[in-house]
Amino acid sequence: MRILPRTIHELPILALAAVLALAAGCAPKAKAVGQRVSIQVTDEGFEPAVVTVKAGHPVTLLVKRVSDQTCATELVMKEEHIRQSLPLNEEVAITFTPKRAGDLDYACGMDMYRGKVHVE
């Protein structure tokens, strides 16, 4: 295996390859994403209205508002201190880690449409 360059023009390529190899070995490892749950906001509200997750593991709610005929333009989960805007036709990721079993209620900003994260 040849390590030294044959010409001066190969030196920058070898240097770049060495830097990339070192960076790949030293980069922090990605953490597990955890539980991902898709929720749509329709004319009827949050669908599904109840989702189930496990306590102590990160949860990502992937919320997409597909209707402009609703007041649910944001998701509010008071217990987790979440207030997230829901732009039309854009998926929004809301991540948190539920600490204990039970129900986490959420609603639209006007508290008319509601949903629940059931934590086991």
Image (cartoon, rainbow, N blue to C red):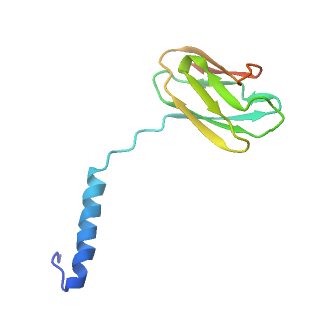
x and y percentages locating residue 71 in the rendered image: 78, 29
Q: Is residue 117 left or right of residue 109?
A: left
Residue situated furthest top in the rendering:
102
Q: Is residue 25 left or right of residue 41?
A: left
Q: Quadrant of residue 79?
A: top right
x and y percentages locating residue 29 in the rendered image: 34, 45
**Residue at the (65%, 42%) spot, across then down:** 91
x and y percentages locating residue 13 in the rendered image: 27, 75
Please identify the quadrant where the N terminus is shown.
Answer: bottom left
**Residue at the (80%, 38%) spot, across then down:** 67
Task: Count numbered badges in the picture.
Answer: 0
**Residue at the (69%, 40%) spot, across then down:** 87
Q: Quadrant of residue 21?
A: bottom left
Image vertical order of residue 51 relative to residue 18, above or below: above
Camera sees residue 6: yes
Most foreground residue, 92 or 48 = 92
**Residue at the (68%, 36%) spot, across then down:** 86
Please identify the quadrant where the C terminus is shown.
Answer: top right
Q: Is residue 117 left or right of residue 48?
A: left
Camera sees residue 120: no
x and y percentages locating residue 23 in the rendered image: 28, 56
Residue situated furthest bottom in the rendering:
7
